Image (tube, rainbow, N blue to C red):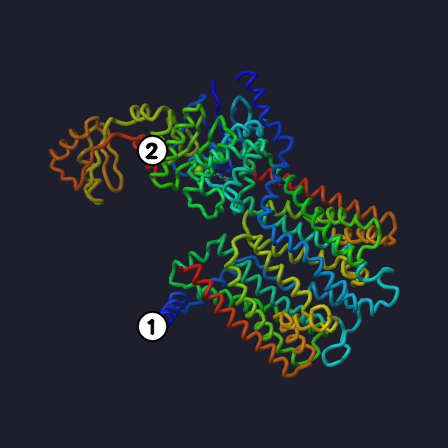
Amino acid sequence: MSAVTEQRAMRRGGVRALYAGNARAVVGRGLVATRSSNWVVIASGFFEPVFYLLSLGVGLGAFIGTVTDAAGREIPYAAFIAPALLAVSAMNGAIYDSTWNVFFKMNFGKLYEGMLATSLGPLDIALGEILLALFRGAVYGIGFQIVMQLMGLNLSWWALLAVPAVMLIAFGFAAIGMGVTSYFTTFQQMEWIMFVLTPMFMLSATFFPITVYPEPVQWLVMALPLWHGVELVRGLTTGVVGPELLVHVLYYGVMIAAGLAFTTRRLRALFLD
Amino acid sequence: MSSEDRLELRRAAVRPRAFGAWYVTEHHVRIWRRYLGVNVATAIGTPFMFLLAFGIGLGLLVNANAGPGGVDGVSYLVFIAPALIATSAVTIASDEFSYPVMQGLKWNPIYIGMHATPITARQVVDGLVLFVALRVTATTFVYFLIMAAFGGVPAASGVLTVPVATFTALAFGTPLFAYAATLREDRGQFAVVQRVLVLPLTLFSGTLFPLEQLPAFLQPIGWLSPLWHGAELGRVVGYGAERPLWLTAVHLAFLVVLALAGWRLAVRVMRGRLDA
Amino acid sequence: MTVISATDLVKRYGEVAAVDGVSFEVAPGESFGLLGPNGAGKSTTMRMVGAVSTRTAGELTVLGLDPDEFGPEIRARLGVVPQQDNLDNELRVRENLLTYGRYFGLPRRLIAERADELLEFAQLADRGDAKVDELSGGMKRRLTIARALINEPRILLLDEPTTGLDPQARHILWDRLFRLKEQGTTLLLTTHYMDEAEQLCDRLVVVDHGRIMAEGSPAALIRQYSTREVLEVRFGSERNAAAAAALADVGDRLEVLPDRVLVYADDGEAALVEVTARGLQPLTSLVRRSSLEDVFLRLTGRSLIE
Ligand SMILES: Nc1ncnc2c1ncn2[C@@H]1O[C@H](COP(=O)(O)OP(=O)(O)OP(=O)(O)O)[C@@H](O)[C@H]1O
Ligand SMILES: [Mg+2]
């Protein structure tokens, strides 16, 4: 009994030591750094999904024709793949910001050591980085939505909700990504991240409906976070909206909570122990 | 200094002058071995994943739409297999010739350490190029075997997709190497190069679908892409795709010239960087 | 006979002359030092001698060869300890020695033997399988030095070998360097530390702004540019200047530093008596022997460690 209370007290003390309630300072620094950093870098982030859309939606689309969507309608391949690309780019952006970016700052820039020497705690830094990732994700998401609109790939007004959905996806991946990154010390180890993400990218109903798989494989894919993200965004932009979208949202809610808990624990282990 | 002394001095550098590049390669292999797990897992996992996603998954959609004639006269898997092999080669090259180069010059300056020994700047470059060529060849050979096992590479000449992929990787990689060696500060340049150069050159390169499917204004990007030349060359050897001989010669020449030009440039840049 | 000979050596980076007409000679088995403040051009000189930096002008031979032409031949006979460690952080401690040895074209068996000896020498025998990242700064330094010895070099270039080491580690390192010197290795080293220069160098040059200010053995330099003893007196920061004015003719020479006044005299105690005789009451006083620091102060008007 006393051991439990003691533990609980310690944990509370732990959070206080980790969090100074000042993630804003980190966000502020990030925005200033963004403003003074290379604009080409930022602008180029917008082109990435657009290039994918041109290549896969237009090039491959001409090759494939139409796809049957969840409501049984035949929709152009471009309209099928565009929301998937949007979800994937949210994932990639969040992963980049929370893994490579954080990895660099931890191991090369030594930025965090400088920050931690001030009153900021690791959790301020984690939240700050994640908020920055979300902000960037939203900006890119809006840009991509505009391109989709111009190409006539938004089939419903529900598409307006795609940007918040994208931010949800980004939050989920960023929360987990940071914790995972804290285990890595070299570039090559970082490749494990790609090793996990690439198959998920290729198999999560991004390029084709999962109905092409046998049933057990379908269940497997449906357990993956990206599949929920893709289906959520696709439901909104194609206008096939039903209660199952709430399941996807719930999935991300759990992922965010778990990711934050995990990242906080890792940061404490790294910086305070 | 006696003449005997001089002779002894010369002798000390005979082996490094002859085999220095190979010693550099050995060093890279040793680093590669530190990450054997992820390297081997990726080398084997990637082809299976592409097979599953594109060969089978996407293939169902494409084959259904393309009809019995298939794509370029063959099934979708056979059509994309040589291109996928070349793509995996390019991926390795663009990984090896970007951040690690900056790392070796700046964050963990092992190139500077090498240069303090009898190793010359040229050997530092040659050794890395040789290592990447070896790594790419080994990895794409595994890729080729897996593709062939699933019927992706029907022609007997299909094993030549491996050297073709190696050339493609070097044509793509050595200019990137030269560029990476010029960088003194990381301001996100690689992200930009990756997004505005590597990505379009990969996406608009007739790998997943024939280049002609793209709108006319995007096709020239493919002509400039080593990956398009490599993929087309791979198709010729992979399933005997019918292409005019002159075009095949152009593909080959393009890859060789670009690889050599990038290599030379990398040597020049590296000389400037290492002579401080 | 010389192993290193530099005449009017110049290295320019754009407008900056990092090395601006430096001449010196180093004899076989000699231990030669470059002493100077930050930015003096020490590392630049070392890089030129190490045949990894092309000189802008002047003459330079190392082991009788021109570095611009025979870089690999020269480097095959050098051991280099750069100012900044460039160990391979991705490899383990012993692997660092093995890969480095290969660069000299040595057979693997020989390298393996030497690697074990050198790990012993660097007191890292039990850390052979550790990751380089896990070593302390001082351990990394020792590993870098061990690595530089893998080819049994004739000349060892040491750029600030003991910066960042604790006093004990420095003394151990000095001891190792003495042993190498006894075996006939020529040492060329740079340092900020006067005690290090006095301990290790047979001869040294004082460099500032890319030029040589003085040359000689530590004892000769002290004899030439300073008095036998120095009296250090403190009067409190505001009063030092005024006190110095009153002491102008005490001893051979005066130096007024922000925090103290240095009185150069062959007999420091006598100078102190003279100071009190003039009715001045220093807060603290200290009589010590002259050091290279004093030589440096005399030559450049600046303190060596800023
Ligand atoms: N690669 C370079 N490019 C431009 N300037 C350089 C370069 N290397 C050195 N310098 C300049 O040359 C001068 C001498 O530098 P050097 O590193 O030789 O000094 P040092 O005596 O070794 O100093 P420290 O004690 O700080 O190591 C400095 O002004 C430095 O800024
Ligand atoms: Mg220096």
Residue A254: which numbered mark, if any? none
How far across and how far down the image is residue A200, in percent? Answer: 65, 65
Say yes or no: labels 2 and 1 on the same chain.
no
**SS of the residue at dot 1?**
helix
Q: Nearer the viewer, residue A63 or B261?
A: A63
Quick one: which residue is furthest to the front in this view? Answer: A1
Q: Residue at x 56, y 57 (%)?
A: A38
Name the quadrant containing residue B43. Answer: bottom right
Tell whether A82 sits left or right of C217: right
Tell whether C98 sits left or right of B171: left
Question: CB of mark 2 within 8 Å of CB of mark 1?
Answer: no
Residues under labels 2 and 1: Cα distance?
60 Å
Q: Specify whether residue C29 is in view.
A: yes
Q: Is mark 2 within 8 Å of ligand 1?
A: no
Q: Is C41 placed above or below A240 here? A: above
**SS of the residue at dot 2?**
helix
Q: Amino acid at mark 2?
A: Met
Q: Amino acid at mark 1?
A: Ser
Residue A2: which numbered mark, if any? 1
Q: Specify whether residue C18 is in view.
A: no
* Neighbour tally class for label 2: few under 14, some 14-19, many 20 plus, Cα within 10 Å: some
- Which chain's residue wears label 2? C
How far across and how far down the image is residue B143, in percent? Answer: 73, 53
Residue C194: which numbered mark, if any? 2
Q: Residue at x 41, y 42 (%)?
A: C138
Tell whether A241 sits left or right of C163: right
Q: Nearer the viewer, residue A65 or C9?
A: A65
- Which chain's residue wears label 1? A
Q: How many marks?
A: 2
Q: Nearer the viewer, residue A38 or A45?
A: A45
How far across and how far down the image is residue A202, in percent? Answer: 68, 65
Which corner quadrant of the figure contains ligand 2? top left
